[in-house]
Image: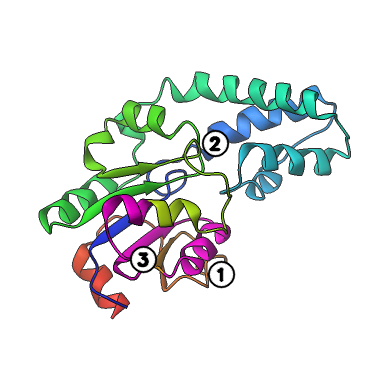
């Protein structure tokens, strides 16, 4: 692997915790369809596209819906979710993230976003983080869901670096696999048991630095 020239970040669960808002919106949808949706169920939706999330929700509830109804329900869920994220503030940035971004900038390391979320720009603007990113790839730019590496490969391409020079930060198993499939190194954010395919795993960004990352990846 080459020298580290760029870092590519997933959004939900890495930079900010929007999972709680997704959960409230999906739970509301499930309840409207006549079944419950637990936080454990919600874990299955991590890093998954909106339509695939709806398919999983339907599997959980044992319901079968035509395509037109599915599209309407996915839009309804997104509208409810948007109501929550439009109230987000920079206080919701996860601890240590901004300091780590500052550290990367000081070292001349490029920063990209690689997220399945179609609301990524709205969230970054609400958090006032957009200026930190040299490239942004979100759900409006890709057609293949993780573990396909498309979102990360596009990020590397926009930054102008080979995948071997990029490090991905991910909190979902499918995201870690996407990074590996794209020929990139990966730092897992969260549980070592779940993210055991990552090069190494940290609980979060507090006290984390470029030097620590570099030494762990050597």
Quadrant housing residue 86: top left
Q: Secondary structure at mark 3?
A: helix
Characterize the local packing of mark 3: few (<14), some (14-19) or many (20 or more) Cα atoms within 10 angstroms. many
**Which numbered marker is on residue 163?**
3
For the question of whether residue 208 can be seen, the reply is no
Q: What residue is rendered at 34% in x and 39% in y?
A: 93
Q: Write down the residue under mark 2.
A: 20
Residue 109 image point, x, y percent:
19, 57
Compare marks 1 and 2 and give the one earlier in the sequence: 2
Q: Write down the residue under mark 1.
A: 193
Count the marks: 3
Residue 21 image point, x, y percent:
54, 31
Quarter that holds the C terminus? bottom left
Contact, CB < 8 Å: mark 1 with mark 2? no
Q: Bounds of the magenta span?
A: 155-183
70 to the left or right of 9: right
| Whether residue 25 is situated above or below residue 191 in the rendered picture | above
């Amino acid at each position: 692997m080459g020298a580290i020239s760029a870092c590519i970040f997933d959004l939900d669960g890495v930079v900010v915790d929007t999972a709680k808002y997704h959960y409230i919106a999906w739970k509301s949808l499930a309840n409207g369809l006549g079944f419950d949706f637990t936080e454990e169920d919600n874990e299955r939706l991590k890093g998954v596209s909106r339509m695939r999330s709806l398919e999983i929700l339907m599997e959980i509830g044992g319901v079968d819906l035509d395509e037109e109804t599915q599209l309407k329900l996915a839009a309804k869920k997104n509208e409810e979710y948007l109501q929550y994220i439009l109230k987000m503030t920079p206080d919701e940035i996860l601890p240590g993230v901004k300091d780590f971004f500052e550290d990367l900038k000081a070292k001349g390391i490029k920063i990209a976003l690689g997220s399945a979320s179609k609301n990524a720009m709205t969230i970054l603007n609400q958090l006032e983080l957009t200026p930190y990113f040299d490239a942004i790839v979100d759900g409006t730019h890709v057609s293949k869901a993780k573990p396909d590496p498309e979102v990360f490969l596009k990020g590397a391409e926009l930054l102008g670096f080979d995948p071997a020079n990029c490090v991905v930060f991910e909190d979902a198993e499918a995201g870690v696999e996407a990074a590996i499939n794209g020929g990139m190194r990966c730092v897992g954010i969260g549980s070592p048991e779940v993210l055991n395919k990552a090069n190494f795993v940290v609980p979060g960004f507090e006290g984390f630095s470029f030097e620590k990352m570099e030494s762990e990846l050597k």
